[in-house]
Image: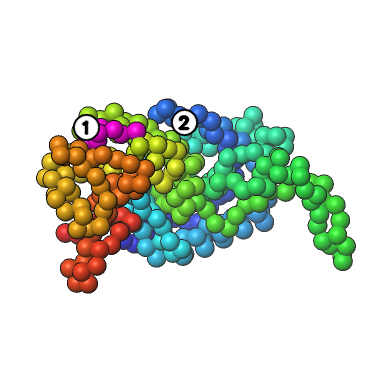
């Protein structure tokens, strides 16, 4: 699908610019995170460079796909998700009023920020470009280096702290639409990783899921805190194939033909081991498919039904 029209219609070139830095806390156990932000005064030259960078980001988008737990954007593509499915409203609210007491006046107010927001305003609308901070924002990282600059054929000590603002952004938000360019950074800023962990805990407690296994512990140990496995567990819960008796019956009948090592007891329960957990996850995601043309069996990253 093409880039949403509201993004192409937004007048980036003439928009007002403000920059906010945020530290994030909380967001565990299903609770919303807390975003603490300060706005930072910028000059005209930096504002112009930021507008240009965001125009370049928008100009490179050739394809937009819906956000999925296992979907990944590539260099000229973005994923899209509704802002109301995220904590974007909290960030937008925090940038609504650049009050004098929210202006960054001390270094410690912006050092160790989790992410920064470039807020563009045009014709009463706001676009938010968000980027997770790099190591230049970390006080520990800066304490271990000597900053220098080269001028007039001489390398001199730089005593002023420097922060890197990337020409790339992790996501753009406008209205109720978010375009995602870095999925890991989006999930980190919006606390989606924690949501995956909560999803897996809920999945384990579901009788329909837990009842598939002789012992769920090997699968829980296999998933652990691995962010990819947690994403897959969330996708298993979202797809819900394990709730379909016919799907499970066909899995018992055909798993060997699809080169899946899944051990079933005589009663039809899955008996997981550390060695078979990967195939169990693949099976419950319905990600082991066969081509009718080449007759080759494939793993697929995200099975999307074609109508």
Who's the residue at 13% across and 41% down the image?
245
Who's the residue at 35% across and 37% down the image?
218
Percent position (x, y) of residue 58?
46, 60
Position of residue 220 in the picture relative to residue 170 (left or right): left
Query: Which residues fall within the magenta stretch?
Result: 210-217
Q: Is residue 294 above or below residue 163?
A: below
Percent position (x, y) of residue 243?
18, 39
Which is nearer the eye, 248 or 191? 248
**Residue matched to label 1:** 211
- Decide which of tag 2 and tag 1 comes sooner along the chain: 2
**Residue matched to label 2:** 27
Which is nearer the eye, 295 or 10? 295
Outermost front residue: 266
Position of residue 267 in the picture relative to residue 109 (left or right): left
Quadrant assignment, res 287: bottom left
Task: Check if residue 216 falls in the magenta segment.
Answer: yes
Other residues around mark 1 within 10 Å, as few (<14) / some (14–19) / many (≥20): some
């Amino acid at each position: 699908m093409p880039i949403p029209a509201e993004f192409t219609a937004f007048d980036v070139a003439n928009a007002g610019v403000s920059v906010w830095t945020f530290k994030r806390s909380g967001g565990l156990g299903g609770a919303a995170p807390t975003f603490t932000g300060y706005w930072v005064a910028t000059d005209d030259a930096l504002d112009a460079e930021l507008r240009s960078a965001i125009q370049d980001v928008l100009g490179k988008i050739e394809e937009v796909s819906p956000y999925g737990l296992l979907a990944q954007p590539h260099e000229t593509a973005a994923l899209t998700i509704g802002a109301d499915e995220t904590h974007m409203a909290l960030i937008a609210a925090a940038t609504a009023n650049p009050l004098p007491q929210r202006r960054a006046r001390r270094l410690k107010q912006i050092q160790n920020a989790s992410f920064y927001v470039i807020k563009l305003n045009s014709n009463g609308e706001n676009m938010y470009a968000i980027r997770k901070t790099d190591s230049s924002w970390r006080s520990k990282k800066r304490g271990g280096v000597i900053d220098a600059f080269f001028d007039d054929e001489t390398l001199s000590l730089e005593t002023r702290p420097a922060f890197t603002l990337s020409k790339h952004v992790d996501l753009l938000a406008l209205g109720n639409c978010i375009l995602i360019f870095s999925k890991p950074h989006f999930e980190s800023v919006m606390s989606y990783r924690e949501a995956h962990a909560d999803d897996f805990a809920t999945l384990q407690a579901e009788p329909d899921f837990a009842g598939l296994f002789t012992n769920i512990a090997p699968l829980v140990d296999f998933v652990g805190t691995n962010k990819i496995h947690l994403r897959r567990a969330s996708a298993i819960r979202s797809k819900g194939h394990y709730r379909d008796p016919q799907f499970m019956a066909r899995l018992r009948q055909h798993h060997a033909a699809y080169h899946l090592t899944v051990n079933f007891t005589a009663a039809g329960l899955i008996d997981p081991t550390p060695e078979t957990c990967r195939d169990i996850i693949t099976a419950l995601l319905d990600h082991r498919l066969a081509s009718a043309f080449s007759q080759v069996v494939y793993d697929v990253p995200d099975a999307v039904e074609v109508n």
